[in-house]
Image: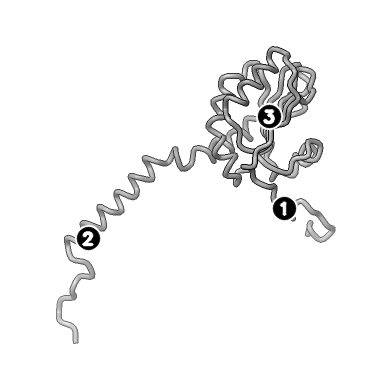
Amino acid sequence: MQSGSEKSFLNHSQKSLLILFITLIILSVIAFKNLLFQPNFLLKKFGELSIDPEIAFTNNKPTFLEFYAEWCEVCKEMAPKVADIKEEYEKDVNFVFLNVDNPKWEKYIRNFNVNGIPQVNLFDRDSNLEVTFIGKQQEITIRESLDNLQHDLKSNKPILNSEYSIIKKNKNYQSSPRSHG
């Protein structure tokens, strides 16, 4: 049988500790949100602000073309470095970012044989493919290649790296008469 006054589930000191713990978790998430969410934000921003590839290949500027996906951990890791590179070179170089999960870019994915991401293709002013990077790359390697492009120095060496994400086959790309209704 219960008495007239029910006992509290938590006493006062336990409630205070719980409130303090929840506050610390919230403050930690706010403090570290840039570290946790910046790469995802950058990848979305890259895709939204990307130059159309057709324009990039016809405006007589070197072109940086990156194939990426928002789920790709290596793409997320490289995003802050690529953002720095873009900021430095964007006056003189086209920056094109194509999300491999967007069926709109399927033609480019096939044309450039993309089967691992990130894949960065660098083109000269005449839209000739000069260098292909697949996987995680050092920032200095990309910068040196961009400098070579700007000074019309040729270097047709693909650089491969084992740290990349394999593109997942997405059945949403397949269509059938039943897929529209």
Q: Label 1, label 2: how many angstroms apart (C-alpha)?
A: 48 Å
Q: Which residue is mark 1?
A: 170
Under mark 2, the amino acid is Lys
Marked residue nearer the N-terminal end (3 or 2) = 2
Residue 16: give x, y in percent of width and height: 21, 57
Q: Which residue is mark 3?
A: 96
Kindly identify the residue that appears in the image at 65 percent across and 16 percent down: 92
Marked residue nearer the N-terminal end (1 or 3) = 3
Confirm or deny contact between disc 1 and disc 3 (CB under 8 A). no
Residue 24's tag is: none
Kindly identify the residue that appears in the image at 66 percent across and 26 percent down: 95
Q: Label 3, label 2: how many angstroms apart (C-alpha)?
A: 53 Å
Q: Residues within 10 Å of mark 3 (few under 14, many from 20)?
A: many
Under mark 1, the amino acid is Asn
Q: Say which of marks 3 and 2 sits in front.
A: 3
Confirm or deny contact between disc 3 and disc 2 (CB under 8 A). no
Residue 120: give x, y in percent of width and height: 68, 32
Label 1's element? loop
